[in-house]
Image (tube, coloured by chain):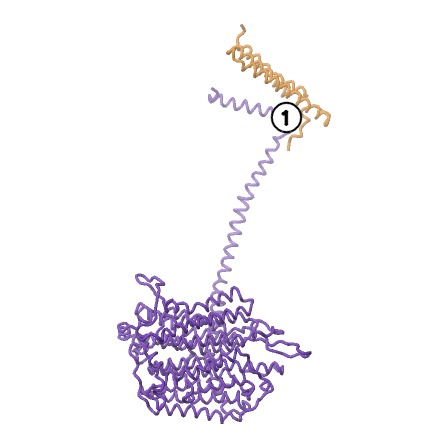
Chain colours: A orange, B purple
């Protein structure tokens, strides 16, 4: 059986890729994709700890499902915002959406 | 009810009437005078009841009606207040209650009750009359006093003060009644406060009597510290009196002498004796019932009553007695000389009052205790009668003034009168009786018996100087009384106003008749036993009764022809001379006795003005106001002002503005502003940049925590 650390390393790598995507991509939709990657990296961690811990205890699985649901909701709100911004300012580049300053 | 309880109740109706009128009934004139007269009547009934009971007690002097309660705790003992009716109190109560009732009744008519309100009458001024239309033509009638109810309220309070004074068994409550009357006399003299002369007279009366009252209060305090009690019967115990008499005090007086002298000064103020007599003639500014109230029944009698009460104390020191006799005799003569030259009908009576009070004081000074009480009572009757009679004359004259409409004619000036005998018969006859009683017309009138007794006592006790002085004064009394009667009632009317004078209503004449009755008959209760022919016909009840007040009954003096003849000569001589001199005098110019010095009352007002009023005004205006207040006090304050202002400027310019405002206040704001300006570059509005900051911070914190081993 594959040891637990492999899963953890894989999840950490996935999280870092997602973080890099969030910080570096200019397209707001791509930033959302990065966020999804980070959330799913967490889900891998949850599933792995469940499997290698007490199997009868369902907490890890339940938590992972809640994260899916929240992620789906978050993406839908995020995409709606992106569309709204695009309609107003005709762009989806994050650097150009800079109204939130003094 | 016991007699003692009744005595407690005597002063109650007037004070209740005062509050009732002031608080409830003052809108209604009818209710107010009903309450006032009713209260006076109630007090009179109770007083008469007490008087009759007092007559029935065999040794009232030794066992008077008395009852007292504890009032103020004074350490181990109590200050007691209570009531006392001994023979003196009973006799005084008798005349006080009658005269008060008469004055109340008279006031109803005097203030024109039942007449219409005046056309342009104002509060604080005497009524001017009202125009009435009758059978198609207009004529002017007297109008009702605008402050009718107030008058009865004051009068009731006054009566309360007098009753308190008479029934008190101690000096303290007596003094309280005394001061209530002082206040009321001020209020009543200044009743027509719209007149400046009335205001000034009120202030003058109040200030002058106040001088006497301060000394009296000193006397009371001295007496209390010396004996520890203010109750008459305790002071007059033999051992107390002996102790007081044997302790010497200043100026060769004994303690008793000094106390009596201080109390006597109170009387000098209240009874208008020289040198504090100046207020009484001016008090004539008040309405006439007030003059009668103040001069006959109450206030001035109160002064004499107080000396009579303190007689056991007074008689301890012969020096004090000499002072009292001198003041009394001097005042009697001195006031009589002024009365001769006065033209105002009420002023003559005012000076005559001062003079007659001098008789009583002189009588006390020579030790004639009973004669003083006797004269006090007869004088109260005939002087109340004369004052009310003069008020009736003035009222009648005012009627004439209203008829002719000539308001320049002074209705009080006797030279404007004349011939009123036929116009006002009741007033004339009663005034004549009062005047004859005042002059001491022989045998019939009360004034003769009381004055004769003073003469007899002064003569028998060897006070020849006092005797001669009083005889001269009595001669002048008869003279100016006849002058007054001749000028007012006899001869022909000298003015149109006098021709149209009218008799006054029954409320005014009834008191005159009743008082005239007493002015004649009251003398008969005190006819000396050794008097030729008449003596012994009627027992000398007054001597027996009032004499019982003192511990030692005064002995009956031997009859002597000299005082009796003197009395007869001065009375009849004065009356005759007065008639013949003034029979044909029609104007002040023809009156040869209008000597400036007498006319101007020996310049006493001017002297007092120069000695006291001017210096007092100077002290207040120039010394206190200009020098002390404006100069010294304001000067000091004006120095403080600039100093404080300079100090303030320094603090403002060198501490407040640079340090507090600039450095601390503005400085902190500047720092914050500068810091904010620098920091705002951080906020770019780029989400990814923020995220990088967050990541870097997170990692940095994590690294620090890891480095210090805090990440478990």
Residue B124 shows in the view: yes
- Residue B134 at x, y = what percent? 66, 78
Q: Residue at x 59, y 18 (%)?
A: A66
Q: Residues within 10 Å of mark 1 (few under 14, many from 20)?
A: some
Q: Secondary structure at mark 1?
A: helix
Up the image or down, B130 lies above or below B597; here it is above
Residue B178 shows in the view: no
Up the image or down, B150 lies above or below B665; here it is below
Between A60 and B199, the residue placed more toward the observer is B199
Up the image or down, B578 lies above or below B347; here it is below
Image quarter of residue B417: bottom right
Image-based side of B474 in relation to B661, left or right: left
Q: Residue at x 53, y 12 (%)?
A: A50
Subunit ID for the residue under disc 1? B
Up the image or down, B502 lies above or below A75; here it is below
- Residue B404 at x, y = what percent? 62, 83
Which residue in the protein does label 1 denote?
B687
- Residue B11 at x, y = what percent? 42, 69
Between A2 and B613, the residue placed more toward the observer is B613
Between B349 and B428, the residue placed more toward the observer is B428
């Amino acid at each position: 059986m594959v040891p637990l650390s492999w899963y953890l390393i894989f999840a950490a790598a996935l999280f870092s890729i997602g973080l890099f995507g969030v910080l570096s991509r200019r397209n707001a939709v791509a930033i959302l994709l990065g966020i999804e990657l980070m959330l799913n990296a967490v889900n891998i961690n949850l599933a792995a700890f469940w499997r290698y811990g007490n199997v009868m205890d369902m907490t890890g699985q339940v938590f992972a499902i809640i994260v899916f649901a929240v992620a789906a909701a978050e993406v839908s709100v995020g995409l709606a915002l992106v569309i709204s911004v695009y309609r107003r300012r005709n762009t989806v580049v994050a650097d150009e959406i800079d109204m939130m300053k003094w | 009810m016991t007699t003692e309880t009744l005595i407690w109740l005597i002063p109650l109706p007037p004070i209740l009437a005062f509050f009732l009128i002031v608080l409830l009934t003052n809108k209604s004139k009818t209710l107010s005078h009903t309450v006032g007269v009713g209260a006076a009547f109630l007090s009179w009934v109770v007083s008469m009841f007490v008087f009759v009971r007092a007559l029935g007690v065999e040794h009232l002097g030794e066992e008077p009606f008395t009852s007292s309660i504890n009032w103020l705790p004074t350490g181990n003992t109590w200050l007691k207040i209570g009531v006392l009716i001994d023979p003196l109190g009973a006799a005084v109560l008798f005349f006080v209650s009658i005269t008060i009732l008469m004055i109340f009744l008279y006031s109803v008519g005097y203030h024109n009750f039942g007449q219409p309100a005046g056309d342009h009458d104002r509060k604080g001024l005497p009524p001017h009359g009202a125009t009435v239309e009758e059978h198609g033509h207009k004529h002017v009638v007297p109008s009702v006093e605008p402050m009718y109810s107030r008058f009865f309220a004051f009068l009731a309070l006054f009566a309360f003060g007098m009753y308190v004074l008479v029934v008190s068994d101690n000096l303290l409550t007596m003094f309280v009644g005394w001061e209530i009357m002082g206040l009321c006399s001020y209020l009543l003299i200044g009743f027509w406060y719209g007149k400046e002369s009335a205001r000034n007279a009120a202030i003058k009366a109040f200030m002058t009597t106040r001088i006497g009252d301060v000394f009296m209060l000193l006397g009371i305090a001295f007496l209390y510290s010396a004996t520890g009690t203010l109750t008459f019967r305790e002071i007059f115990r033999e051992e107390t009196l002996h102790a007081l008499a044997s302790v010497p005090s200043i100026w060769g007086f004994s303690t008793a002498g000094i106390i009596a002298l201080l109390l006597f000064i109170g009387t000098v103020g209240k009874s208008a004796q020289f040198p504090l007599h100046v207020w009484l003639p001016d008090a004539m500014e008040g309405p006439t019932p007030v003059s009668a109230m103040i001069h006959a029944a109450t206030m001035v009698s109160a002064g004499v009553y107080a000396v009579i009460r303190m007689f056991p104390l007074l008689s301890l020191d012969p020096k004090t007695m000499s002072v009292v006799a001198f003041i009394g005799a001097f005042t009697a003569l001195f006031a009589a000389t002024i009365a001769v030259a006065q033209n105002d009908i009420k002023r003559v009576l005012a000076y005559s009052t001062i003079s007659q009070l001098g008789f009583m004081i002189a009588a006390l000074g020579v030790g004639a205790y009973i004669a003083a009480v006797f004269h006090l009572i007869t004088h109260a009757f005939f002087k109340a009668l004369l004052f009310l009679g003069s008020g009736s004359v003035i009222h009648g004259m005012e009627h004439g003034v209203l008829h002719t409409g000539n308001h320049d004619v002074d209705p009080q000036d006797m030279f404007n009168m004349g011939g009123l005998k036929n116009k006002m018969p009741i007033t004339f006859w009663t005034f004549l009786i009062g005047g004859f009683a005042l002059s001491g017309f022989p045998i019939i009138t009360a004034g003769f018996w009381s004055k004769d007794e003073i003469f007899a006592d002064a003569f028998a006790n060897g006070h020849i100087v006092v005797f001669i002085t009083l005889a001269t004064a009595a001669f002048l009394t008869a003279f100016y009384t006849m002058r007054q009667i001749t000028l007012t009632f006899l001869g022909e009317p000298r003015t149109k106003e006098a021709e149209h004078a009218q008799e006054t209503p029954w409320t005014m004449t009834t008191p005159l008749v009743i008082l005239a009755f007493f002015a004649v008959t009251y003398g008969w209760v005190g006819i000396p036993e050794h008097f030729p022919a008449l003596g012994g016909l009627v027992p000398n009840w007054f001597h027996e009764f009032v004499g019982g007040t003192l511990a030692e009954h005064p002995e009956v003096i031997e009859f002597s022809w000299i005082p009796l003849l003197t009395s007869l000569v001065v009375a009849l001589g004065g009356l005759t001379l007065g008639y013949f001199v003034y029979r044909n005098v029609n104007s002040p110019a023809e009156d040869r006795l209008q000597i400036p010095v007498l006319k101007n009352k020996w310049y006493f007002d001017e002297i007092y003005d120069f000695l006291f009023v001017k210096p007092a005004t100077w002290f207040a205006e120039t010394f206190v106001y200009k020098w002390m207040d404006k100069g010294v006090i304001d000067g000091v304050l004006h120095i403080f002002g600039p100093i404080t202002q300079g100090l303030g400027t320094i603090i403002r310019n060198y501490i407040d503005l640079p340090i507090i405002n600039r450095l601390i206040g503005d400085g902190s704001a500047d720092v914050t502003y500068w810091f904010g300006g620098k920091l705002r570059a951080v906020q770019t509005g780029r989400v990814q940049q923020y995220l990088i900051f967050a990541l870097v911070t997170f990692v940095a914190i994590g690294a620090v925590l890891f480095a210090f081993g805090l990440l478990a």
